[in-house]
Image: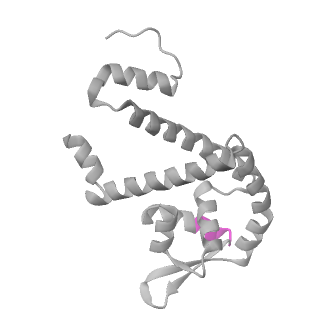
């Protein structure tokens, strides 16, 4: 199949249209449009947050860990923290180490299980957030300003429902179950 000259970017609608022509009834175009929209929105949202955090020399993952620890009622194990921020343990170690070097978090051996560590936010971490978060909340309002309050609530509900669906599907086949079932389809 010969296509015209390549453009640098196709809209989501154009991508869905091409895929629908290629795969026909094997493809639900709405699922593809949803997936592509989620990917693009996540990428743009992440870039916006990364730019906001860059002057403070903190990554988005570090910020996420710091805010989770700030809201937690005490220290969290690395496993609890990983679950809360959806980061695998191997990747979480480097994130926490970066925060430790800046003295924004502290780690201690878990007295209930010496094989694990407890991570907690330090006074310096709390002070950083106290200075940063008020402006951050205003920035989030700006980013989501195109949605009404009702639309924001609806979007939260739908994304929570989608998250549950993805977690259920992933749990049904184990960690690699989704990839395996997709390859075997």
Horizontal side of 164 relative to 24 (left or right) equals: right
Q: Is residue 58 left or right of residue 5?
A: right
x and y percent of residue 50 in the render? 65, 48
- For this orientation, the residue located farthest to the left is 184
Q: Which residues are magenta?
A: 97-103
Q: Depth check: 162 or 94 in front?
A: 162
Q: Judge whether 69 appears above or below 137 on screen.
A: below
* Residue ID at (59%, 65%): 65
**Residue that appears at 49% across and 80% down:** 117
State whether residue 129 appears in this view. yes
Residue at far bottom of view: 111
Q: Is residue 70 magenta?
A: no
Where is the N terminus found, in terms of image quarters?
top left
Q: Is residue 174 something that shows in the picture? A: no
Q: Position of residue 123 (x, y in %)?
A: 73, 78
Name the residue at 71% across, 51% down.
140
Q: Position of residue 38 (x, y in %)?
A: 50, 41
Is most of the magenta stretch helix, strand or loop?
helix
Q: Residue furthest front?
A: 150
Towards the viewer: 71 or 120: 71
Please name whichever residue, 116 or 83, is drawn nearer the observer in this view of the structure. 83
Query: Please, is residue 56 above or below residue 45 in the view?
Result: below
Q: Position of residue 54 (x, y in %)?
A: 70, 50
């Amino acid at each position: 199949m010969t296509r015209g000259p390549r453009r640098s970017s196709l809209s989501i609608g154009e991508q869905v249209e091409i895929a629908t022509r290629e795969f026909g009834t094997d493809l639900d175009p709405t699922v593809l449009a949803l997936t592509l929209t989620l990917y693009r929105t996540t990428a743009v949202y992440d870039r916006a947050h990364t730019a906001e955090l860059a002057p403070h020399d903190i990554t988005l993952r570090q910020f996420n860990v710091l805010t989770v620890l700030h809201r937690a009622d005490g220290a969290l194990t690395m496993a609890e923290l990983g679950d809360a921020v959806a980061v695998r343990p191997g990747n979480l170690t480097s994130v926490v180490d970066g925060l430790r070097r800046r003295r924004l978090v502290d780690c201690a051996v878990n007295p209930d299980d010496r094989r694990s560590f407890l991570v907690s936010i330090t006074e310096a971490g709390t002070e950083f957030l106290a200075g940063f978060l008020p402006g951050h909340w205003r920035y989030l309002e700006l980013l989501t300003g195109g949605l009404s309050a009702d639309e924001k609530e609806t979007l939260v509900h739908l994304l929570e429902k989608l998250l549950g669906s993805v977690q259920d599907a992933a749990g049904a086949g184990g960690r690699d179950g989704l990839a395996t079932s997709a390859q075997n389809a």
